[in-house]
Image: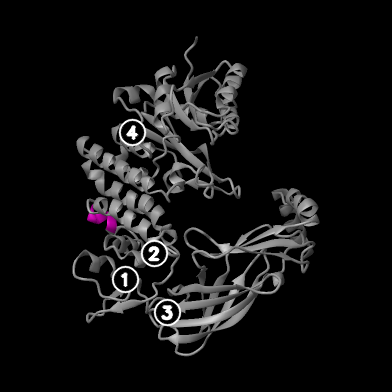
Amino acid sequence: MNTPDVTVTVIVYNDAERLPRAVASVRRQTHADIEIVISDDHSTDDTPAVARRLAAQDPRIVYLRLDENSGGCSAPRNRALEVARAPYLMFLDSDDELPENAVEVLLAAHRERDIDFAMGAVQRIRVDSGRRSTWMPHLVRERRTLDGVEADPRLFFEHLATSKMYARAFLDRHELRFPEGIHYEDQLFSAQAYCLAKTFTIVPDPVYRWYVAPYAASDTASISNQRHKLTNVRDRVHVQGLIDAFLAESGHESLREDKDYKFLKHDFRMYAGDLPHRDDEWLASFADIVNPYLDTLSPGAFARLPRDERVVIQLVRDRRLSDARTAARGLGHGVAPRQVTTDAEARTYWGDRIPAAGPARGELDVTDLELDTRPFFSALFRHEITEITPGPGASIGLTVRTYDPALRLPVGPQRATLLLTPGRRRLTVPFRLSPVRPGVFEGRVHLDLAAARLPVHGFEGVRHPVLRLRHQGRTHTGLLLAPVSFPRLTARVPYRAGTAPHHVSVEPEGHNPDRLQIRWQPLGATARVLRPVARRLATPRVRRAARLAAGILR
């Protein structure tokens, strides 16, 4: 048989339903001289039958089945490497796809010059909403060829092995294979590839479609979405230690701070956003696992983080776990602490106490946030819903507590407005916040979801209400934190401004930043007829024609 140009390995385990889609995306490649290896990690469902049927349809497909399940991605990839015949290699997971020209684009980069691997952009597609985004877009924005990762250590953040085409000679020369028996194998493999490669090329073209299911059931969630498991935390920390050892052994110790920063900014940050949803026992075990590793990281890596992330990390290190849970709510969204404390030198610290001397004092010092001097529109407040009560019909009552740790608001009642925008029309609900004590206000607001004016064709989607404050002619808008858990409230919203009723639900967001979440679902004729018609009409050409007509009529 002739040697193919590229071998694409599709790894699979108990995924008979999605495997044909993944393989079809490879068969559609504009560069057709390829080999497709389906590497089955000893599936127990219909995957073997599906894989054999696919192999019978296309002579380019080879079906490889492991003798026993390995429990990870590494072994099926490594076994495929043993049988792959092409000089260039790619990897695909069975729940993802390759864009039609992925092989062509990456192979062209290899043929243009002698490189160890080529990499491109990854499209992330939310399976719940269909929303598309580019993974790490700032790293793949332009075409460039780098002589080693030292030229851009930020690439440690792009740790996917599936977004790259590797020269087989490069992998064999360094005996580079996926580490078996551990999770997060991509992180170690990619770190090694980055450091060992003399030259690699980045192209801005999409070369991988990554389907993300953030709310999948725990038994079907991907490894990265199993953060509720303490074994997941241990696996991630273990891999970091392996990367650190590799950097030291391979003479790349100078990259340690960049790699440490990546761990804090990406890996630890993912767990930090979940901390409000963990109980005390889980938090204590989490601290036991991560704190010894945090002690080994470069101080410069911590210094590069935003202040709010440094606060959460330090509270975990100090085992102030309840405080860490509070600080993690709204992380990254400009949410103030409930309280700050000022020392004799006018330094301001997070929380109700001045930290003891040492690292904690520096990390919990929030003076640089300029809580008392920043412009009012960007001031830091904290709005928390402390009580939710169902009302008649589709209405709910909310008790809202606002924290003003820098005392930016004057003494006395404050005017506030709850804003909610399903579709393009805003629902505004004014209410009053009354002082409870200095820096704390509380108010009660009645929100009638049936009063929201919906588009004629209805509205399907999720919205998060926000709270607006007014002071001396200036406004400030901030997010509204929901209780971490409360029973989901549902109602049928009758006809008002749309054409048919809707089903509406109120629930906690369930993940960072923990906002109040309201979801609309059209019912009846709106769902069956008008919305499909509206979607067909809402093409770019129709929208341009409508804008042109409106311009002529003005």
SS for dot 2: helix
SS for dot 4: helix
- Residue 168 placement, left or right of 473: left
Q: Nearer the viewer, mark 1 or mark 2?
A: 2
Rendered image: mark on residue 325: 2
Alpha carbons under labels 2 and 3: distance apart: 19 Å
Alpha carbons under labels 2 and 4: distance apart: 37 Å
Find out whether the residues at labels 3 and 1 contact each other: C-beta distance under 8 Å: no
Residue matched to label 3: 404
Mark 2 or mark 4: name the one nearer the start of the chain: 4
- Residue 518 placement, left or right of 144: right
In the rendered image, residue 58, in percent from the top left (x then y), is placed at 59, 18
Rendered image: mark on residue 366: 1
Alpha carbons under labels 4 and 3: distance apart: 49 Å
Mark 3 or mark 1: name the one nearer the start of the chain: 1
Task: Determine the image quadrant of residue 28.
Answer: top right
In the rendered image, residue 300, in percent from the top left (x then y), is placed at 25, 55
